[in-house]
């Protein structure tokens, strides 16, 4: 029977449409093709191949063609369901399930076709398969709507209802006993025309619906990532605020620690200050006696000069004490470590002498140098470190206790560092203290606040330096040492 030209044109249009449709969807999803979208696109491509084979079969029927189009229809259904299921749950199902379904489908449709039953049982089976696909895909789409809050899936649900209506109509007519030639695709009856039209429109709607769904899903993911980034930024700001607050607390602790240490030096300070004050008092009495005895002017001026020296010494001690106790400036500037040490060295030397501990200071640098630090905070750090060394040496087990303060240069990492070292010959740091140097609370004293070592490390780090807190090597005499690696000031 010759084929009508309109029939041939319609078949060619259907083939062209189902060739362009997957390519167009692939292009529309450019940049958004994740693994799930690629599975869906593979399903659309299989369906387009199956429908094109159906249109070709109306022009030249063959059993091989029928078996192939059935296999592609079955593969398209399985792939689309898999894409929706993976969107709902990321857990992968075993691929052998789909392989088994394909093998059973190939066996069934091959048997039906070769037995000459495709026009009845084969078409009924295809319609039932699409009805099951429509029901399952509708359930998955509804669950995805609740999960992703997307409206594009409503278009897919509408397309599935339209697709199921055409196959439900054909299946009901076949079960009702309608002649097979009335529900063939190429029969051009009202029901076959409705089936073809509903199927084509349904696949177009499903394609656009899934495209919109992918775009909305990506938009939601973008919003979620932006929300997480905003939360992370807020967390960073909170962390920075906490770090700043911690540094402020450490500075306050340094001031409290300096005052606490000075309180333990009270006897020595009173003794050092009282000596020049007593000498000043005796000198005033002597000066008064000389004035009454009509001594020469030169002799009186010499006595007055001696009293000025004594007064200056007392004032210097009080000034150094005040500098350690009052609030210091926190900014960093070029300072001389030698000059900073000279200010507090008399106080430390007096306490060491009172405890019968040798305290020595040596500047090993050949020329004056400056480092980037804060004078008051550096003095407090040295004051605290030497105070800890004095406490560690204040026990009978240490013979000839000694503390050494040294300033020297050393090259490391292509950079010249200025190192200020406090070393003693005491028992050294315990293993527990050395293993927890970065802990926020670390102390070996019964009443210690536990912030001394952390304060030293944090303050030097704020000056772009670093610290070395360790025991002396095993091949040397026992003891502990704290090194402050300070950044030299640029000339």
Image (cartoon, rainbow, N blue to C red):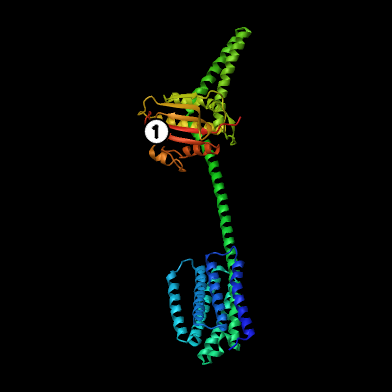
Q: Position of residue 408 (x, y in %)?
A: 50, 27
The outermost residue toward the front is: 2
> Residue at position x 58%, y 16% from top?
307
Q: Residues within 10 Å of mark 1 (few under 14, many from 20)?
A: some
Instruction: Compare residues 228 and 211 and report the one nearer the observer.
Output: 211
Q: Position of residue 243 (x, y in %)?
A: 54, 45
Q: Residue 221, relative to residue 377: is it above or below?
A: below
Q: Position of residue 265 (x, y in %)?
A: 48, 29
Does residue 22 appear in this view? yes
Q: Residue 44, relative to residue 226: is it above or below?
A: below
Instruction: Compare residues 451 and 90 and report the one nearer the observer.
Output: 90
Q: Which of the 4 image quarters holds residue 283?
A: top right
Q: Residue 87, relative to residue 453: is it above or below?
A: below
Check the picture and name the quadrant holding the C terminus: top right
Check the picture and name the quadrant holding the N terminus: bottom right
How many numbered badges does the structure rendering display? 1
45 relative to 450 in the view: left or right: right
Q: Mark 1 = which residue?
A: 428
Instruction: Compare residues 5 and 474 and report the one nearer the observer.
Output: 5
């Amino acid at each position: 029977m010759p084929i009508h030209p309109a029939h041939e044109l319609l078949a060619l249009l259907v083939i062209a449409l189902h060739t362009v449709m997957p390519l167009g969807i692939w292009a529309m999803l450019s940049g958004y093709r994740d693994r799930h979208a690629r599975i869906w696109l593979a399903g659309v491509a299989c369906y387009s191949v199956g429908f094109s084979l159906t249109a070709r079969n109306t022009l030249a029927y063959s059993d091989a063609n029928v078996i192939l189009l059935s296999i592609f229809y079955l593969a398209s259904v399985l792939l689309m369901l898999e894409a929706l299921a993976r969107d709902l749950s990321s857990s992968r199902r075993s691929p052998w399930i789909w392989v088994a379904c394909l093998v059973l489908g190939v066996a069934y449709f091959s048997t039906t076709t070769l037995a000459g039953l495709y026009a009845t049982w084969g078409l009924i089976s295809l319609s039932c398969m699409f009805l099951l696909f429509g029901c399952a895909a509708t359930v998955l789409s509804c669950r995805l709507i609740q999960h992703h809050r997307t409206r594009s899936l409503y278009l897919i649900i509408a397309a599935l209802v339209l697709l199921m209506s055409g196959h439900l109509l054909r299946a009901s007519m076949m079960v009702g006993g309608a002649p097979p030639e009335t529900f063939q695709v190429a029969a051009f009856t009202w029901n076959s025309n409705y089936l073809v039209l509903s199927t084509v429109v349904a696949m177009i709607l499903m394609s656009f619906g899934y495209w919109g769904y992918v775009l909305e899903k990506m938009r939601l993911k973008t919003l979620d990532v932006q929300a997480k980034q905003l939360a992370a930024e807020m967390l960073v700001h909170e962390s920075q605020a906490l770090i700043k607050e911690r540094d402020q607390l450490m500075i306050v602790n340094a001031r409290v620690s300096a005052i606490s240490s000075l309180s333990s030096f009270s006897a020595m300070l009173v003794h050092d200050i009282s000596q020049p004050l007593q000498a000043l008092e005796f000198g005033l009495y002597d000066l008064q006696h000389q004035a009454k005895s009509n001594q020469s002017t030169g002799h009186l001026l010499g006595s007055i000069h001696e009293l000025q020296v004594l007064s200056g010494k007392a004032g210097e001690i009080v000034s150094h004490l005040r500098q350690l106790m009052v609030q210091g400036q926190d900014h960093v500037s070029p300072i001389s470590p030698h000059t900073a040490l000279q200010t507090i060295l008399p106080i430390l030397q007096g306490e060491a002498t009172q405890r019968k501990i040798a305290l020595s200071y040596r500047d090993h640098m050949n020329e004056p140098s400056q480092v980037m630090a804060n004078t008051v905070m550096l003095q407090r750090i040295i004051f605290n470190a030497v105070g800890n060394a004095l406490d560690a040496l204040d026990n009978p087990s240490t013979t000839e206790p000694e503390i050494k303060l040294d300033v020297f240069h050393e090259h490391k990492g292509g950079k010249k560092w200025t190192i200020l070292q406090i070393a003693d010959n005491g028992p050294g740091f315990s293993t527990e203290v050395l293993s927890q140097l970065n802990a926020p609370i670390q102390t070996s004293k019964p009443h210690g606040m536990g912030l001394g070592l952390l304060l030293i490390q944090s303050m030097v780090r704020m000056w772009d330096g670093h610290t070395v807190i360790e025991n002396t090597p095993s091949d040397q005499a026992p003891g502990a040492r704290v090194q402050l690696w300070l950044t030299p000031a640029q000339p």
